[in-house]
Image (cartoon, grey):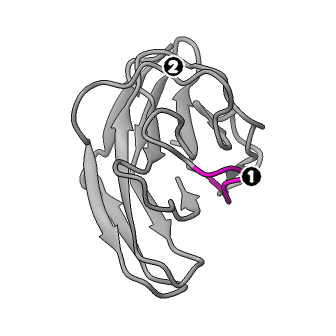
Amino acid sequence: MAQFSVSGRMTAAATNLLPGISLYAAASTRLIVREIGIFNTTTTACQVAVRIMTTAGTQGAALDELEWDGGGPSPDGTGFNSHTSTGPTITAGNYRLATIGAAAGAGVIFPFGGTGDTETAPFTPPHATQRPSGEKLAPVWL
């Protein structure tokens, strides 16, 4: 099975309605998320959350997916930078939630263990990182 990674730094501040970074399963595919890492580049503590979305909203710029092995199939997921004018529909509750310390480089890694977290297209469910309560959101590596 081919493995990919996608990473980015937010170009706009995330809010409770507009995710900072998002990952969507490609049409008719099975996306397996193995790990999500979120790191702070500021000296301000922040809260971050991984949320489930059921619609796309207005996505920002596409991020580049990197294949680890080279020469394989296309990625099963697409990452996007900061969402813009229209937010996606976000389900209630946090899939994962953490507070990141007030130091550049502080962060959290959410492993999904074993076979990972399986998602199917088109939006069932993608993952997004966002700030749940008004703090700055750190850059995200999905």
Q: Residue at x 68, y 43 (%)?
A: 81
Name the foreground residue: 124 vs 31: 124
From the top left corner, tell me how far across and down residue 122 is, in percent: 50, 13
35 relative to 106, above or below: above
Segment colored magenta:
6-13
Q: CA distance from mark 2 to mark 1?
A: 20 Å
From the top left corner, tell me how far across and down residue 52 is, in percent: 35, 31
- SS for callout 1: loop
Q: Is residue 87 left or right of residue 34?
A: right
Disc 2 designates what residue? 29
Name the foreground residue: 98 vs 77: 98
Q: Let me know if residue 9 is in the magenta part.
A: yes
60 relative to 142, above or below: above
Q: Residues within 10 Å of mark 2 (few under 14, many from 20)?
A: some
Residue 70's mark? Answer: 1
From the top left corner, tell me how far across and down residue 17 is, in percent: 47, 32
Q: Main secondary structure of the magenta part?
A: loop
Which of the two discs, 2 and 1, labels the residue nearer the N terminus? 2
Q: Extreme front residue here?
A: 134
53 relative to 135, above or below: above
The kind of residue on which mark 1 rests is: Gly
12 relative to 26, above or below: below
Q: Let me know if residue 53 is in the magenta part.
A: no
* Quadrant hosting residue 92: top left
The kind of residue on which mark 2 rests is: Thr
From the top left corner, tell me how far across and down residue 137 is, in percent: 50, 60
Q: Residue at x 45, y 63 (%)?
A: 37
Q: Residue at x 70, y 41 (%)?
A: 72
